[in-house]
Image: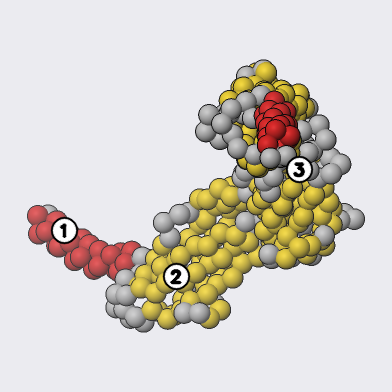
Amino acid sequence: MTMHTNYLNLFIAILFLGVCPMNTHAIEGNNSVILYTPYTKISVPPGESITYSVDVINNSDEVKNAIISLSGLPRAWDYELTAGGFTINELSVLPKEKKNFTLKVTVPLKVNKGTYRFSVSADGLAELPLAVTISKQGTYQTDFTTTQPNMQGNSKSTFTFNATLKNQTADQQLYALMAEAPRGWNVIFKANYKQATSAQVEPNASQSISIDVTPPATIAAGTYKIPVHATTSTTSADLELEVVITGSYEIELTTPKGLLSTDITAGESKRIDLVVKNTGSAELKDIELSANKPVEWEVTFEPTKIERLNAGEATQVTAILKASKKALPGDYVTKMTAKTPEVNSTADFRIEVRTSMLWGWLGVLIIIIALGGVFYLFRKYGRR
């Protein structure tokens, strides 16, 4: 009984040793080729392309020829297998080495939101499950966008907006480019750095569009909205631009008739009417008046300061000019200036100085006295 039992145990042990190596070989055989990529589930919007880098790892002791294929990919989706710059569908891998290939999957534009699963296979050797989550519902549409829709500057500025026109349709589109600008504004579209009124964009492609916006020179300060459109017979997109005009600062100092010359008698005063004009588009504040005058002359202003002057308005100022008593006859220049912290204007006045009438009559009197003296002497001593 004991001997039979020992024979039975020996037989079981021999059978066990024979089976175990066979099972180990089978497991190794099942893992002899592995497909690996680090990102097996990716989330993208419709119309995007996903590029996978996939390794084919040969853990066996012999060369493996791996036929690469995809299964479960939705019908409208496209894919491409490449390696070494070539389109491939089979790879040969040396023992204990690995080869890499690229899988590019293109998601269509019109696709439902959700998760889609498919597999990459090395036929009969290994399988790699992948998943793609579509983040939003796909449609056929056009996007017209810019990262900077708002700009600020004065009325002499040109505002350049950089926009992107994206054709998310399955067909080539020729977009007409239009703007609804206020009267007097100028809007220029540029595609590929050239002025254009239309732009052609391939399916699922983008085109950079620059938009130059120039306001009228005399426009008032404020915020202005400019809608722009890209349209075709089947699709369109809108973009709203905003321009904030801070106003231009300009000032002019002149006279009511534009005449910048006058005359004055030495030692006397004269009132000169001046006009200060705000020729810019922004309000001017704290306008100060000053003069660069000849030595010993005096210039004062009424009023001495203008508190504020709206765009396009003008106000009258009086300059009171007093010439020096010692001023000799001739022409003198007096520079009068109206200035603010932002801008200034200078007018050069030519002042002709004349001799006082008193000195003229005094000269005449001296001449008469001299003539009288000569006449008296002639009468008194002329007969001798």
**Residues at marks 2 and 3, CA–CA distance in whole angstroms:** 75 Å
The front one of 170 and 325 is 325
The front one of 252 and 336 is 336
Q: In which quarter of the image is residue 240?
A: top right
Which residue lies at the image location 65% right of the left edge and 65% below the top edge? Answer: 78
Comes first in the chain, label 2 or label 1: 1
Badge 3 vs badge 1, beta-carbon distance below 8 Å: no
Mark 1: secondary structure? helix
Badge 2 vs badge 1, beta-carbon distance below 8 Å: no
Comes first in the chain, label 3 or label 1: 1
Q: Which amino acid does label 3 sit on?
A: Ala
Q: Label 1 neighbourhood size at 10 Å, few (<14), some (14-19), many (20+)?
A: few
Specify the quadrant that holds the N terminus.
bottom left
Q: In this view, does 286 lie above or below 85?
A: above
Q: Where is residue 381 in the image (x, y as percent from the top left)?
A: 68, 37
Whether residue 165 is visible: yes
Mark 2: secondary structure? loop
The residue tagged 2 is 125
Which residue lies at the image location 77% right of the left edge and 33% below the top edge? Answer: 255
Would residue 228 appear left or right of 159 to someone viewing this image?
right
Comes first in the chain, label 2 or label 3: 2
Which residue lies at the image location 14% right of the left edge and 56% below the top edge? Answer: 5
Q: In which quarter of the image is residue 198?
A: bottom right
The residue tagged 3 is 217
Q: Which amino acid does label 1 sit on?
A: Asn
Specify the quadrant that holds the C terminus.
top right
**Residues at marks 3 and 1, CA–CA distance in whole angstroms:** 108 Å
The residue tagged 1 is 9
Q: Nearer the viewer, mark 2 or mark 1?
A: 2
Farthest residue to the left: give it.
Answer: 2
Q: Position of residue 2 (x, y in %)?
A: 9, 55
